Amino acid sequence: MHEWFNKDSIFWRLLSILIFFSAWEIAGRVPISPAFPTFIDTMEGLFRMISDGSFFEKYMITLKPLLVGVFITCFFGITFGVSMGLSDRIDWLGQPVFIVLQAAPVSALIPMITYVYGIGFTSKIIAVCILAMPVVVLNSINAVRNANTSLIEMSRSFQGTRMQEVFKVILPDASPMIFAGLRLGVAGGFVGIVLAELLITPTGIGDLISYHRSVANYAEMYATVLSIILLAAATVRFFERLEVRLFRPEKQGT
Amino acid sequence: MAAETSDTSAKAESIVEVRHLSKTYDGRVRALEDINLSFPKGQLTTLLGPSGCGKTTMLKIIAGLLEPSSGEVFVNGKKITGPGPERAFVFQDFALMPWATVLRNAAFGLELRGMAKNERNEIARKYIAEVGLTGFENSYPRELSGGMRQRVGLARALAVNADVLLMDEPFSAVDEQTRRKFQEDMLALMEIEKKTFIFVTHSIEEAVYLSDQVVLLSRLPGKVSEIIKAPKAAGSPDEIRRDKVYLDTVEHIWQTLRKYLEE
Amino acid sequence: MKIFGVKIPMMYSLLIWVVLWEIVGQMEMFLVIPPFSGIVVAIIEMAQAENFHDAASLSLYSFAMGMLISIIVGIPLGLVMGKIPAADRLLGMWVNVFLSAPLSSLVPIIMILFGFGQTTIIVTVFMFAVWIITLDTCAGVKHINPSLLEMGESFGASSWQMYSKILIWAVLPEILAGLRLGLIRGVKGVIIGQLLVALIGMGELLTVYSRGFHMEEFWALILFLFAFALGTSWLISLLERRIEYYAGSRG
Ligand SMILES: Nc1ncnc2c1ncn2[C@@H]1O[C@H](COP(=O)(O)OP(=O)(O)O)[C@@H](O)[C@H]1O
Ligand SMILES: [Mg+2]
């Protein structure tokens, strides 16, 4: 019983969700705008899209470049980041580029990407990569830089080679933070794929949004937007849980 | 001589009375159980006991910062319901505002009462001088050592002119040498200020050195196990530290506390 | 990094990239990469062009308004969430959802609700910036040294004094950190909003330049935007450094 009122309990979550959706429902019934469907209308719209098959079909199209982009980002991001973390020279040369890319509105580059790579799959992957990469790289750098010095000194004092030091001490010690970077990278990837869908070509969920907007099916349009936001949040949350389970067992259950 | 002192202290009226005080955290941890104590006016009483026995809890209840689970606290005969101007707290971690100068920190209690700036700064300056920090009025806490920071905390508590000063291990975050000097200064200060001090420490020597009365607390649930009158020996600090009565009292307390550790 | 024993600050390496860019540009290897010197010329021309002035002032106005509303909403919301556990439990989940969500997907909705003009951009900036300000403020309140609050209480601070004399100052470092991140997100919000509306401000210029293949102008605008984003966040970080003394005295 006690547990039910804990911070992260189902009770508070459900209450929070209930209040949000009730507020939406009320705002839709007022209505605050003719283009603002109620929550129940939106859910009906969602079920219409699910039952005519368009919802999952479009999601498959959306998620493919996202997945590919995230895998590319993982591989190159971690490789870049770890090498910069290990080598001062590479770090000096490379890190500022990623700092700039992290802070700057890189979405402004998307019109040009479209121009160069056309409106296809490649452009979308690139959009995902440029939005996801900086945070993965920067986190990996910091993870390696912040590896426990006394562990490293321990390894040296036992005459460990640099290879052993990197693979047996630094990387294992850095992996929780690298993983945290991947989680942020996945969030960035979602931003990238949505931008790609809206700015490059609407083939997946972008198509759902723009088609239903053009025929004034606002319920379907809202349902699509809600679904992508919740999917992104749920995915990030999943990675958060995974991070705790894999790397920080002491925090489990909190 | 000793008999005479204890005689007067028995007659001295008490300013703080604690009656049947109990405190249970989260319905489980019994931190304090049925505490009855009186704190004589103008004297220094130490709460002494192993860590986790409820010293901070009791002090914060007296300060009005915590609600007791049952029982009550009277100050000047009136039951307390919260913090009040007749009590001032000195914090273990100093609780200084990092964005404010020494002067503003020391005057902060008066600032909260809405006293005019000139007036409160003048009072604060006086107490800053009294605790030996003249010249540091415009420094920031980060520029001071631990011992000096706690002097600011003390000046702030003195400035509001409360009757009772509540001090929670005020010297525990201070290194040993500074601590000894601070203790000696405390004794001198008590001569000038004539206030009632309630002092928490886990150092037996510090307790006996500074106190008129030492309250020994036992662990979980915290109960009063013994009250020891410790008349202050006369003479210089160094003489006191070699005084026979002082050393005997320290030894007696150690033997008592040792029993809890062996249990 | 050190060269001949002299430490070269990291950001200087960007100069090497600029030189590399110039070389690649001069060799005309890629259509989309004009020589850097050409871009610099374009920046100078752009700085005098009327359409740039219009776009810049329009964007700056939307940005400033959106940020202002974010601050007005975000800081009090964060303070309330930090102080009142029930508020945190009810709102915290949504703040976190919006923090990591692809908010650009909301822009089409904002567009049909608020039209194709300034208001949409302002609302977009707000949606991008407000959550991180709220979250950081809330985290700051939760990590405040509890004895500082007890100190205020023991000296009889009223709840207004508690907020105005202690809480807000103790949380200032986190508020500024949130503000810096909020500004960075806000700039992204302006650009994404304007790109999606496509008819106004920088978004219009970016679309026009890339469609008409004016690569020098396109890059000039990009560099300007990057510099603006980095410049504002740098200004805030200067402010943060001025109050860094908080950090040292926190437990
Ligand atoms: N806020 C709290 N919640 C639960 N238990 C607490 C809390 N504060 C203190 N305690 C417990 O109460 C007991 C007494 O604590 P405290 O008064 O801080 O002891 P002392 O100051 O003598 O070291 C300890 O066992 C401690 O764990
Ligand atoms: Mg304590």
Image (spheres, rainbow, N blue to C red):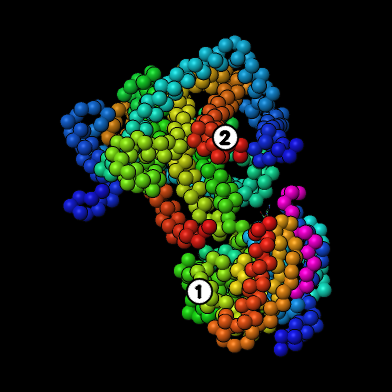
Secondary structure at badge 1 equals: helix
Q: Is residue A48 visible?
A: yes
Q: Position of residue B129 (x, y in %)?
A: 54, 82
Q: Which mark is residue B159?
A: none
Residue at image location 37% in from the left, 47% down from the top: A149
* Residue A21 painted magenta: no
| Tag 1 and tag 2, C-beta contact below 8 Å | no
Residue at image location 31% in from the left, 24% down from the top: A116
Residue B263, placed above or below residue C181:
below
Callout 2 environment at 10 Å: few (<14), some (14 to 19), or many (20+)? Answer: many
Q: Position of residue C72 (x, y in %)?
A: 58, 49
Q: Amino acid at mark 1?
A: Thr
The residue carrying mark 2 is C97
* Figure quarter occupied by ligand 1: bottom right
* Residue B28 painted magenta: yes
Chain assignment, label 1 = B
**A54 or B89, which is in the foreground?**
B89
Side of C101 where A145 appears, left or right: left
Secondary structure at badge 2 equals: helix
Q: Is mark 1 within 8 Å of ligand 2?
A: no
Q: In the image, which residues are magenta?
A: B26-39
The residue carrying mark 1 is B178
Chain assignment, label 2 = C
Q: Quadrant of residue B116?
A: bottom right
Residue A58, placed above or below residue A13:
above
Q: Main SS type for the magenta part?
A: strand
Residue C138, placed above or below residue C100:
below
Callout 1 environment at 10 Å: few (<14), some (14 to 19), or many (20+)? Answer: some
